[in-house]
Image: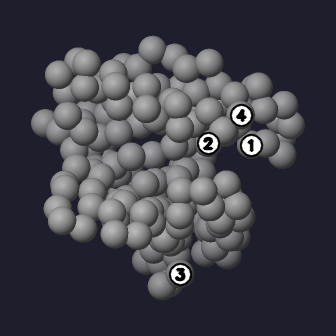
Amino acid sequence: MITTPKIEQRNQQHYAAIRTKVGMNDIPTKLPPLIPEVRAWLEKNKVTPDGPPFFQYVSMMDSNNQLVTEVGFPVKDPVAGDGRVIPGYFPAGRYATLTHMGDYMGLRKANMALDAWVKENGLKEQHKVDADGVEWGTRTESYMTDPQQEPNPANWRTDVSVLVAQ
């Protein structure tokens, strides 16, 4: 199930994440193992997450079809990072959002539905396109349900959002 998209005004949100490159087909195997690594880093550094884990899609290079991604957690205050874990923030602004309920295999469809809604409503996702590919302003999937706590994929909630150009 995919909810009707909407626009939300959000404040700036700091985060701690691991940045990596991944092929589209490798997302399910390469990115989820980074969540406990970031969580362990937060615990070691006595930083409390300020929200659920997320995947942020930073850019896609056309030449090799590799996505630059960040896997992390929102945090209340900026962190220093250590090279492997980096600091970052989601900028304040207007975000187009929707909620996907179900198995993660449906997230591509959810992202496509959000993209279509943005376009149909005369909005534009904040992004930059050049000869190398596309760099998104902010494109995230926030994993609201922990599969270890809720084993039934039908009950998994993922919030999908994109930063809308002002």
For mark 3, what is the residue?
84
Cα–Cα span, label 3 and label 2: 22 Å
Q: Earlier in the sequence, mark 1 or mark 4?
A: 4
Residues at circles 4 and 2 in contact by the CB criterion of under 8 Å: no
Question: What kind of element bears circle 1?
Answer: loop
Question: What kind of element bears circle 4?
Answer: loop
Q: Is residue 50 left or right of residue 156?
A: left
Residues at circles 3 and 2 in contact by the CB criterion of under 8 Å: no
For mark 4, what is the residue?
103
Cα–Cα span, label 1 and label 2: 7 Å
**Crowdedness near tag 1: few (<14), some (14–19) or many (≥20) residues, C-alpha within 10 Å:** few
4 vs 2, front mark: 4
The circle drawn on residue 146 is 1
Q: Earlier in the sequence, mark 1 or mark 3?
A: 3
- Disc 4 residue type (three-letter): Asp
**Crowdedness near tag 3: few (<14), some (14–19) or many (≥20) residues, C-alpha within 10 Å:** few
Question: What kind of element bears circle 2?
Answer: strand
Cα–Cα span, label 1 and label 4: 12 Å
**Closer to us: 75 or 141:** 141
Q: Residue at x 17, y 62 (%)?
A: 130
Q: Percent x, y for residue 119?
A: 25, 26
1 vs 4, front mark: 4
Res 76 seen here: no
Cα–Cα span, label 4 and label 2: 11 Å
For mark 2, what is the residue?
143
